[in-house]
Image: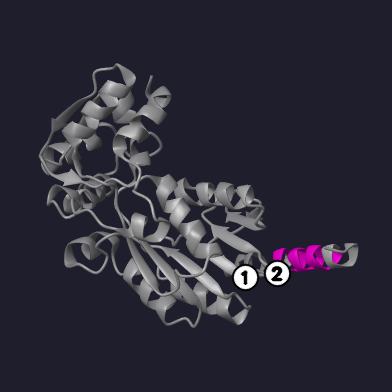
Amino acid sequence: MTKQTTKQTAKQTAKQTAKQLILVTGGTGKTGSRVVSRLRERGTPVRVASRSGEQPFDWHDRTTWDAALEGVTAVYLVPLDGELLTRPFVERAAELGVERVVLLSGRGVDTPEQADVTGPSHLDGENAVRAGGLAWTILRPDWFTQNFDEGFFRDAVLAGELRLPLGDAAAAYVDAEDIAAVAVAALTEDGHTGQTYDLSGPRALTMAQAAAEISRATGRDIRYVPLSPEEFVAELAGQGWPAADAEFYAKALGPVRQGLNSHISDGVPRALGRPARDFTDYAQATAGAWR
């Protein structure tokens, strides 16, 4: 290869890289932060958009949308739950030249039980993405394994008791690392356009089984104490939760309690060509956060 050819190749690569700029909304959240890390590891230019991120972005302030979207070719879109803002955002993205969107949705948003929890926002967002004229991919994850160390269940694990209204129902918890890996593949590779990936872990666990996995990983005694929804709401109220928030939390757990999150899906292996990460591996890698 001549020096001139080498220079031309380098210029072409630089030009392609310059053209590729990916916007990550919710860029400091559970999946968004992991998408950002993976993109940066690949050397892909990324813009982190959130209220506290590098690029100020507020769903309720549309004056922040254009600055976030300027020069962007693809978007990892984490919607604002309960708000019908995905549609106008996708329309504006298309007007500003965005070519691809990967939407984080949720499992079962097209079923009455789940839609009753999430409201119309997720389903309307999916419909908007499909009709928006962009290359699109939709991710529908189960409950995140990271809820045990970064989210809803963290304080309960640290306290040694998971007091929840889940009965003996199981959920196929999916690792946020797998969600991020699928998102990055869909943002940067061919073959994912028009795909809706239902994302789960490789097996379903009851809360008692999840507690046992964490106990083995940490050497601590983590117990699951099943409550009725009424007992759960009363305990939260006793801890100072507003009644409406306590009732919504119990309602959000309803589909899990009904066994609607227990089925295993093929989204991770179909998108990545490998198995989804098992809960045991997650618990062992995360054990230090619970000690």
Residue bearing the label numbered 2: 19
Q: Is residue 208 placed above or below 54 in the rendered structure?
A: above
Q: Is residue 74 above or below residue 39?
A: below
Residue 271 location, x and y as percent?
40, 60
- Indicate the position of residue 232 as horizontal and vertical percent values: 17, 38
- In the image: residue 53, left or right of residue 17: left
Highlighted range, magenta: 7-17
Name the residue: 38% across, 51% down.
Answer: 274
Sequence-earlier tag: 2 or 1? 2
Circles 2 and 1, Cβ within 8 Å, touching? The answer is yes
Q: Quadrant of residue 145?
A: top left
Q: Amino acid at mark 1?
A: Thr
The location of residue 218, given as percent across then percent down, is 33, 20
* 264, 237: nearer the viewer: 264
Q: Residue lying furthest right in this view?
A: 3
The quadrant the N terminus occupies is: bottom right
Residue linked to disc 1: 73
Q: Is residue 3 left or right of residue 34?
A: right
112 or 139, nearer to the observer: 139
Residue at 25% across, 28% down? 213
Q: Quadrant of the C terminus?
A: top left
Name the amino acid, label 2: Lys
Which residue occupies 36% across, 28% down? 284
Mark 2 surroundings: few (<14), some (14-19) or many (≥20) residues within 10 A: few
